[in-house]
Image (tube, rainbow, N blue to C red):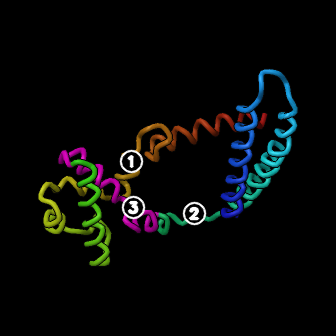
Amino acid sequence: AAELIRAKIGRIHGALSTLTIVMKGLPLAYSKDMQEDKEPTFDAFDSLLLALAAMTGMVSDMKVKRDEMKKAAGSGFSTATDLADYLVREANVPFRDAHHITGAAVALAEKKGTELDQLTIEELKGIDSRIEESVFGVLSVENSVKSRTSYGGTSPANVLQQAARWRKVLEGASQ
């Protein structure tokens, strides 16, 4: 179902592109251009209904496996960006250099068959001496998630705020 939803969203986005191009090209007076707005509009609506039905079915019987999700979130060097951000923010490293340093850390972790947060401070300092012990505060998945505090970010506070907002919206819609 997830693949279908992803494909349908691409189709919906394509319909939006079609509509914006048609609308942008309209002359000052009404013309026959607007005949071309119906097909993508109705197709997008049908695709959205199908995607919503698929998502509803997928989520309604979903079993959340927290431990497996946590393990998956920490794999694949998902905190590499946090390391680069740390180097820029805390060690005043230009991003182009931070990117290179982070790549070296990922390569070392891959070679050792471990994750970034399992490298020792000595190993990290061997890559770049500006890395300090405080780096471990940004290399955990939990801290990575917590640090995303901008609107739409993944911090627990943001997620709880949006969940409460949408519950309120949906409760109002069902009445």
Taking depth in this image into account, of 26 and 162 the one nearest to the observer is 26
Taking depth in this image into account, of 153 and 105 the one nearest to the observer is 105
Count of marks placed on residues: 3
- Is 112 placed left or right of 144 in the picture? left
- Disc 3 marks which residue? 78
Residue drawn where x is 79% and y is 50% of the image: 49
**Does 132 appear in magenta?**
no
- Disc 2 marks which residue? 64
Taking depth in this image into account, of 85 and 20 the one nearest to the observer is 20
Name which quarter of the figure residue 125 lies in: bottom left
Residue range highlighted in magenta: 70-93
Q: What residue type is labelled 1?
A: Lys
In the rendered view, tell whether residue 162 sits above or below residue 102: above
Q: Which amino acid does label 3 sit on?
A: Ser
Q: Distance between the residues labelled 2 and 3?
A: 20 Å
Name which quarter of the figure residue 110 lies in: bottom left
Q: Position of residue 37 (x, y in %)?
A: 82, 38
Taking depth in this image into account, of 25 and 82 the one nearest to the observer is 25
On residue 146, which mark appears? 1
Name the dominant secondary structure of the magenta segment: helix
- Is 154 placed left or right of 99 in the picture? right
SS for tag 2?
Answer: loop
- For discs 1 and 3, the disc positioned in front in the rendered view: 3
Q: Where is residue 92 in the image (x, y as percent from the top left)?
A: 19, 45
Q: Position of residue 162 (x, y in %)?
A: 55, 39
Q: How far apart are marks 1 and 3 (CA)?
A: 14 Å
Q: How crowded is mark 3: few (under 14 residues within 10 Å), some or many (20 or more)?
A: some
SS for tag 3?
Answer: loop
In the rendered view, tell whether residue 7 sits above or below residue 24: below
Q: Position of residue 114 (x, y in %)?
A: 31, 74
